[in-house]
């Protein structure tokens, strides 16, 4: 099973290995590049002391997500699949670490331990398979096992993390909270579109071509990522108030 082996995952491509077999899926990746560009412009308008390497790293990862996804929807092989999923996984880990440490004031050691636990949960989620109404870790006796929710189950830990962080920040009245909560809602909708791509393959066509719903995942996911980037700019605007805030630690 080499890196050049073709991978057929989405409705629009079907079983074609042509470079332009997924025009909607490929073109919709421009939304990620636009999200990164607008976030960069917003960041550069901020005072220099309110910018950090974290901000530039997060923006760069969103840009790379767009390029990696574009590569996969053009080439559709295992090498480009890695270029698609690795930047997404890196963004999830980096942003969660950023949110824990910079928004919630969690100590670096606890942040690292939380990230290790989160990565373990994501890895286990990737191993889950669905078959005949069942879900779990299939043994050799199970036949017909496939990715749950068209492979979207792996994104549920990230969705849960966004909801929890957004809720904690909302309780502290942190200005980043609305952006993260809206991002979580939009991400939930985008995951739904990703999950239904094959199930609704025959429902959506353009000039006789089946297009599915994966392109909507790109558009909505890009919006969710932009909102997360916009939330990251609230660092330094107002410190969170709560048990782990700097103010409470100094007065303790």
Image (tube, rainbow, N blue to C red):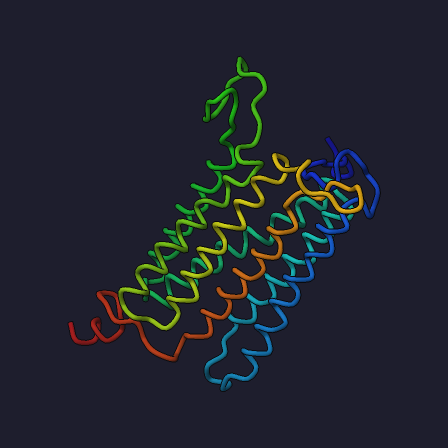
Residue at 57 percent across and 16 percent down: it is: 143
Q: Which quadrant of the structure image shows residue 194?
A: top right
Residue at (47, 37) in percent of width and height: 125
- The picture places residue 35, in percent across and down from the top left corner, at 60, 67
149, above or below 180, in the image: above
Quadrant of the frame with the C terminus? bottom left
Q: Nearer the viewer, residue 139 or 34?
A: 34
Residue 137, relative to residue 252: is it above or below? above
| Residue sitting at the far top | 141
* Residue 141 pos. (x, y %): 53, 13
Instruction: Give left or right: position of 195 versus 12.
Output: left
Q: Residue 102 falls in which quadrant of the image?
A: bottom left
161 versus 135 height, above or below: below
Q: Position of residue 20 (x, y in %)?
A: 82, 48
Residue 45 is left or right of residue 175, and the answer is right
As drawn, which residue projects farthest toward the left? 252
């Amino acid at each position: 099973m080499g890196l050049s082996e073709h991978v057929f995952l989405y409705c629009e491509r079907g079983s074609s290995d042509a470079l332009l077999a997924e025009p909607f899926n490929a073109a919709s990746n421009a939304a990620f590049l636009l999200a990164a560009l607008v976030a960069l412009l917003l960041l550069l308008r901020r005072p220099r002391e309110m910018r950090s390497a974290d901000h530039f790293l997060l923006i760069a990862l969103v840009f790379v997500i767009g390029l990696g996804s574009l590569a996969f929807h053009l080439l559709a092989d295992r090498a480009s699949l890695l270029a698609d999923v690795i930047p997404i996984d890196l963004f999830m880990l980096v942003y969660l670490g950023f949110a824990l440490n910079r928004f919630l004031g969690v100590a670096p050691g606890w942040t690292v331990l939380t990230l290790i636990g989160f990565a373990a949960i994501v890895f286990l989620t990737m191993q889950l398979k669905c078959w005949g109404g069942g879900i779990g870790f299939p043994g050799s006796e199970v036949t017909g096992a496939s990715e749950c929710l068209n492979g979207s189950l792996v994104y549920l830990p990230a969705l849960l993390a966004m909801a929890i962080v957004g809720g904690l920040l909302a309780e502290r009245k942190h200005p980043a909270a609305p952006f993260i909560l809206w991002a979580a809602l939009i991400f939930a909708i985008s995951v739904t579109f990703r999950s239904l791509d094959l199930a609704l393959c025959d429902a959506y066509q353009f000039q006789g071509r089946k297009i599915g719903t994966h392109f909507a995942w790109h558009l909505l996911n890009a919006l969710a990522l932009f909102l997360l980037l916009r939330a990251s700019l609230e660092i330094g605007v107002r410190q969170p108030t709560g048990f782990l805030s700097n103010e409470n630690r100094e007065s303790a």
